[in-house]
């Protein structure tokens, strides 16, 4: 079971100025993160997703709190 | 026959180099063995992509060397012109925005 508020905070800390919303899609360990961040501007989607993933990397994977993280990114000003 | 990890690495990197559009997936395009791989194949087909595919399931070392190369943990992984484009989420998003069609149609420089 993942702590959604903690995950949102981790992403916000990694991407200052971002707007982050994390939702539980199923069972508390399949999460959906919607992230709007100025750092995404001009980056390919893969690099945007890497920035989000790396913020929560230590919580992701088999046997860890997040089993799957679906990501939607948007560049903000 | 014993296949070494180095031979697998050469096979994986060679596939990325030799195929302009290369998909690493679970199963085959005709018979995907995972919903994410299936959805990615559907996006590529819908975008009219002519792509090559490699099944990562027959040997766990395929996934291992692939993820070491790409720095991306999950399957599927789509490469275009040698660059990792993304997995199922990204390919789906690129398909929905119409960008995938442009990417698979553009000629290599």
Image (tube, grey):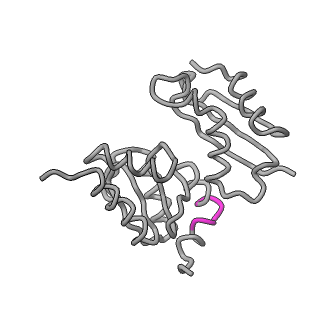
Question: Percent from the top left, x then y, of residue B32?
Answer: 34, 51
Q: Is residue A68 above or below residue B52?
A: above
Q: Quadrant of residue A7?
A: top right
Task: From the viewer's side, name the closer residue of B6 and A52.
Answer: B6
Question: Percent from the top left, x then y, of residue B61?
Answer: 32, 46
Q: Which residues are magenta?
A: B95-100
Could you tell whether B94 is left or right of B63 in the image?
right
Could you tell whether A67 is left or right of A37 in the image?
left
Q: Is residue A60 above or below residue B108?
A: above
Question: Percent from the top left, x then y, of residue B90?
Answer: 58, 52
Q: Quadrant of residue A65?
A: top right
Residue furthest toward the right?
A: A77
Could you tell whether B23 is left or right of A57 in the image?
left
As for residue B59 lying within the magenta part, the answer is: no
Question: Percent from the top left, x then y, of residue A12?
Answer: 77, 33
The prevailing secondary structure element of the residues shown in magenta is: helix
Task: From the viewer's side, name the closer residue of B30 and A49.
Answer: A49
Q: What residue is shown at x 56% (from left), y 18% (from top)?
A: A1
Q: What residue is shown at x 68% (from left), y 49% (from top)?
A: A48
* Quadrant of the snapshot with the C terminus of chain B: bottom right
Could you tell whether A22 is left or right of B89 in the image?
right
Residue furthest toward the left?
A: B1
């Amino acid at each position: 079971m993942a702590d959604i508020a903690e995950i949102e905070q981790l992403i916000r800390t990694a991407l200052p100025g971002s707007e982050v919303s994390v939702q539980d899609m199923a069972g508390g360990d399949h999460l959906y993160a919607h992230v709007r961040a100025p750092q995404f501007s001009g980056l390919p989607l893969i690099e945007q997703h890497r920035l989000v993933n790396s913020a929560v990397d230590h919580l992701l994977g088999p046997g860890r709190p997040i089993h799957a993280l679906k990501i939607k990114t948007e560049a903000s000003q | 026959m014993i296949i070494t990890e180095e031979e697998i690495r050469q096979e994986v990197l060679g596939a990325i180099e030799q195929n302009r559009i290369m998909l690493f997936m679970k199963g085959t395009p005709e018979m995907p063995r995972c919903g994410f791989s299936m959805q990615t194949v559907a996006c590529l087909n819908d975008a009219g992509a002519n792509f090559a595919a490699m099944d990562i399931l027959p040997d766990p070392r395929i996934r291992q060397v692939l993820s070491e190369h790409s720095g991306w943990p999950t399957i599927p992984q789509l490469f275009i012109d040698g660059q990792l484009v993304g997995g199922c989420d990204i390919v789906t998003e690129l398909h929905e925005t119409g960008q995938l069609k442009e990417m698979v149609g553009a000629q290599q420089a």
